[in-house]
Amino acid sequence: QVQLVESGGDLVQPGGSLRLSCATSGLTFNSYTMSWYRQAPGKERELVAGISTNGGTTNYADSVKGRFTISRDNTKHTVYLQMNSLKPEDTAVYYCHADHTIVVNMDYWGKGTLVTVSS
């Protein structure tokens, strides 16, 4: 049974930092591209950041470049999102996504963790 469990969401003041974690189980972690998405109230889910299987390639939404950093630990089967200089517009539920690099339509989602940026 595949599980993706996000943690680390919290209420933080503007300018603050948070580190999200996504612990996975039941899948061959290093065969999956990992990504973080977010969905703000009343908006569509959007890609925040992605990372390749070996961590050598990352990509970011323009809105978070220079503030967020995605990383992964293949020995712990975990992906992280370090979020700095948080803004109120970063408020959203953040979801972890695993996408198999070879098998089409083999992907999984976590249930999300809420990040609220407010003073």
Image (cartoon, rainbow, N blue to C red):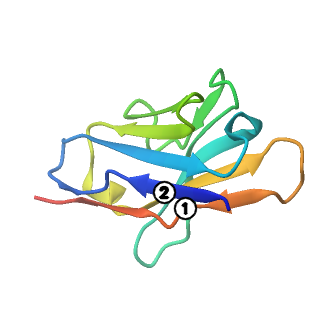
Comparing 62 with 2, the one in front is: 2
Lower sequence index among marks 2 and 1: 2
Q: Are marks 2 and 1 in contact (CB under 8 Å)?
A: yes
From what the image shows, is residue 92 above or below residue 66?
Answer: below
Query: Which residue occupies 42% across, 45% down?
Result: 21
Query: Which residue occupies 35% across, 55% down?
Result: 90
Task: Bin the neighbour count of mark 1 within 10 Å (Cα to Cα): few under 14, some 14-19, many 20 and up.
Answer: some
Q: Whole-percent x and y of residue 64? A: 43, 41
Q: Whole-percent x and y of residue 86? A: 27, 45
Comparing 38 with 4, the one in front is: 4
Query: Which residue occupies 41% across, 29% down?
Result: 66
Q: How far apart are the alpha carbons under marks 2 and 1?
A: 6 Å
Query: Which residue occupies 50% across, 47% down?
Result: 23
Residue 3's quadrant in the figure? bottom right
Residue at the bottom extreme of this rendering: 42
**Mark 2: secondary structure:** strand
Which label was assigned to residue 110? 1
* Side of 63 relative to 54 (left or right): left
Q: Amino acid at mark 1?
A: Gly
